[in-house]
């Protein structure tokens, strides 16, 4: 499978048939390389699924890529974003300015974008500092991640809910709410063509980041939701997957099942680790014990922060299943396996 990984320079806009096109849009300075933006034909003008990172090179690639396929960015009638992250929603605002298109996203992510728009940078730094301290990170670590916040994406004109049809005359493109990677992540089911635009929810080789922020939240269970969202996709059957990164692949259900098992195994391993250590552990200590794609000490502060978010999501999922508990009233927060 890895052999199918190709750098951005080797990606080309493609006519996928059935009135669907893909345009690779670069993510400058990011190892992911590119976002696959899709265009779906409609009598009012194409509708885009995601838009790409907000950067002049990305805009060039999007407008130029559409033109190479015989499409004009000024004719785009709508942009539906799978989730609010900058490599998906970043350029949506510029597309709207160029074409008058509407922007649609799930109501949960729309609420987050609204919050990001209202938050001052200083409040964001305070939030980060507090969150890291409560997780047991040392103060030096905290200082290094401050100020690194991308600008929020454009506010959407339309809010989608699970099961809603996207405004696409003559076709059936349905929003499937798949929370986990973000609270409002959606996949888009092109029901008249057995295709599923999967955003970041189901990718052919990598798995999306699923974290919890702030780390010590108890009112949500993003990993539990993510696993349920994978089951939802499995129930849709062996549709062709059109993901936002990497490459197009068949049988989305099989890949969704594989990702679900990967996380279930990770949960089993994490619980075993906690059983071996009777001492209550901070989120930071747990994250440092877990296996990442590089040794913990070699991860950058930002990546360590994300790893801690993933560790926290796994701890929260184990807690929701009654396998782990958090100690009451301690700061930083600490977790312990429940004896069974
Ligand atoms: Zn994302």
Image (cartoon, grey):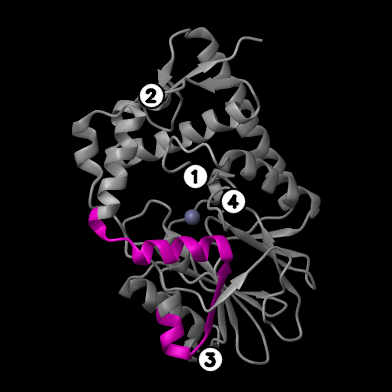
Which secondary structure dominates the residues rendered in magenta? helix
- Which residue position is annotated with label 2? 288
160 relative to 244, above or below: below
Residue 99 is tagged as none
**Distance (Cα) linking label 1 and label 3:** 34 Å
In this picture, residue 72 sits left or right of residue 20 = left
Q: Residues within 10 Å of mark 2 (few under 14, many from 20)?
A: some
28 relative to 5, above or below: below
**Distance (Cα) linking label 4 and label 2:** 26 Å
Comes first in the chain, label 1 or label 2? 1
- Which residue position is annotated with label 4? 203
Q: Kindly indicate whether the residue at mark 2 contacts the one at mark 1 (C-beta within 8 angstroms).
A: no
- Which residue position is annotated with label 1? 209
- Which residue position is annotated with label 3? 75
Mark 1 vs mark 3, foreground winner is 1
- Magenta residue span: 94-122
In this picture, residue 292 sits left or right of residue 234 = left
Comes first in the chain, label 1 or label 4? 4
274 or 334: nearer the viewer: 334
Q: Residues within 10 Å of mark 1 (few under 14, many from 20)?
A: some
What residue is rendered at 45% in x and 82% in y? 95
What residue is rendered at 75% in x and 80% in y? 171
């Amino acid at each position: 499978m890895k052999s199918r990984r190709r750098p951005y320079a080797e990606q080309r806009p493609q006519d996928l048939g059935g009135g669907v096109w893909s345009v690779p849009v670069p993510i400058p300075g990011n190892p992911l390389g590119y976002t696959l933006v899709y265009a779906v034909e409609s009598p009012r003008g194409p509708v885009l699924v995601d838009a790409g990172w907000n950067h002049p090179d990305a805009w060039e690639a999007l407008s130029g890529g559409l033109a190479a396929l015989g499409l004009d960015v000024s004719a785009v009638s709508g942009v539906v974003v799978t989730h609010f992250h900058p490599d998906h929603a970043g350029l949506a605002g510029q597309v709207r300015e160029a074409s008058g298109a509407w922007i649609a996203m799930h109501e949960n992510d729309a609420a987050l974008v609204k919050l990001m728009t209202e938050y001052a940078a200083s409040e964001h730094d305070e939030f980060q500092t507090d969150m890291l301290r409560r997780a047991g990170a040392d103060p030096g670590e905290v200082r290094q991640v401050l100020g690194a916040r991308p600008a929020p994406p454009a506010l959407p004109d339309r809010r989608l809910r699970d099961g809603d049809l996207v405004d696409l005359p003559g076709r059936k493109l349905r929003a499937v709410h798949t929370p986990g990677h973000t609270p409002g992540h959606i996949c888009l089911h092109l029901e008249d063509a057995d295709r599923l635009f999967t955003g970041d929810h189901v990718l052919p080789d990598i798995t999306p980041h699923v974290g919890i922020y702030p780390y010590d939240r108890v009112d949500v269970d993003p990993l539990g939701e993510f696993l349920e969202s994978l089951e939802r996709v499995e129930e849709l059957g062996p549709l062709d997957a059109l993901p936002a990164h990497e490459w197009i692949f068949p049988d989305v259900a099989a890949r969704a099942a594989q990702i679900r098992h990967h996380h279930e195994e990770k949960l089993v391993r994490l619980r075993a680790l906690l059983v071996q250590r009777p001492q209550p552990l901070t989120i930071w200590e747990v994250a440092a014990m877990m296996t990442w794609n590089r040794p913990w000490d070699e991860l950058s502060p930002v990546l360590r922060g994300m790893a801690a978010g993933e560790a926290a999501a796994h701890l929260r999922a184990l807690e929701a299943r009654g396998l782990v508990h958090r100690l009451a009233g301690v700061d930083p927060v600490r977790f312990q396996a429940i004896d069974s």
